[in-house]
Image: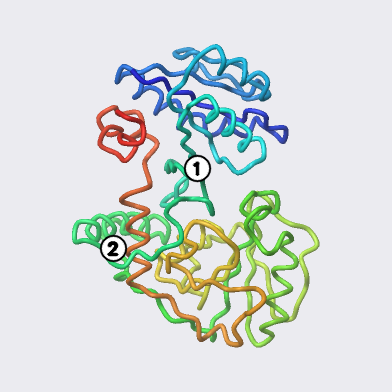
Amino acid sequence: MNSYLFTLAVGVQDRPERWGSVSGYYLNLASSLQRLGHRVAFAINPQIRSRKAFSAYECCPVADHDSLDELLFAERFTHAFIWGGRLDADRETRARLEARGAKVLFSELGWFPQAGTVYFDTHGTNAEVSFNGHHYEDCSPSARKEFNRRRREFYRRKAGLGFFASPPPFAIKAPDLDKPILVPLQDESDTNITLASPFRRMADFVGCLAQTYPECRFVVRPHPSAPVTNLPRHANVSYQESSVDVYQSMADFGLVVGINSTLLLEAAMMNMPVAAVGQGVGTGTGVFHELLVDALPRDLGQIRNDSRKAEAYLAFLIGQRQLFKADLGSPRLVRKSYLSAWLNL
């Protein structure tokens, strides 16, 4: 019998209650692990709202790392989970878990769609995932079939297509600078920006694009849940209201340029050419044209995305990394997933 510890915001000082919104993913997986005959416990920051489902497990209020040490010295865990993993508090949690012999797995929301999906990794999340840094050259027939099925569902939902409508075949287009360029912004407090972006301020990112490429038209979309004030005004920049459906307006643009937003992966799924600065899921895989701030190309119209590599990587994410929240509650499906090997099921 294995012993699993799910941690939620241990040692986190900045709004730890936010982790309550993802606790359901862990509760579903905990249910499956318990039904498979294993021991499950939770270490929860006391500021996270209590849920009735927690009562089925051993739950310990653990606000700081001294309290975590008390738990780890009293009980042994074979495996432990950390949501996110990139905060200083998370890194300290990892160090203390591993010092006591626990194998650590990190988790984060998935991509297609983000809500209701999750992925796990032994190295970390976002820019720190183990599957970055090499190209995925081709799809197997079965992987392509699954990719096309899931992409059809994604495309219909996002683009507002009818049930019987089919999206265009997957093929990344060349940039069309006769159309404006979409620039999705991000939450400046997100770890994707604080840890893995050459731009800490969205205003600097917008200003760089506008001034480097005065011949281009940019439509900048502020992050809907974290809008930034004092964004710059430039003759070649306009701002898209969050009320506009970015997916249904995607065909209005000839290129997408962003930092490391999930929207970049979604745009690639919709055949859009995508250029990215910063580090994120997909870095070094060929799914994006990667831009270096100190060596930006003279002409954005010359950038290219490799459709074959993009398809192979997106199919990998869909078929081999992304899991559905609902499926985590099925012991059979958990045992069939890649988690089985990692968790010694």
Task: Give the left or right position of residue 128, taking residue 185 as reference.
Answer: left
- Name the colouring of the figure: rainbow
SS at circle 1: strand
Q: Nearer the viewer, mark 2 or mark 1?
A: 1
- N-terminal of the pair, mark 2 or mark 1, is 1
Disc 2 marks which amino acid?
Answer: Ala
Of residue 336 and residue 326, the one placed in the foreground of this image is: 336
**Looking at numbered disc 1 in the image, what kind of residue is underneath it?**
Glu
- The answer to whether residue 121 of the structure is visible from this angle is yes
Q: Which mark is residue 165?
A: 2
Check disc 1: other Cα within 10 Å, few if <14, some if 14-19, many if 20+.
many
Is residue 302 depicted above or below 64 in this figure?
below
Instruction: State the mark number for residue 108.
Output: 1
Please, is residue 267 above or below residue 177 in the view? Answer: above
- Is the C-beta separation of discs 2 and 1 under 8 Å? no
Q: How many marks?
A: 2
Which of the pair 9/267 is nearer the observer?
9
Against 51, is 161 above or below? below
Residue 98: percent from left, percent from top = 52, 31
**Distance CA(mark 2)–CA(mark 1):** 32 Å
Quarter of the image holding residue 343? top left
Residue 226: % across, % down: 68, 51
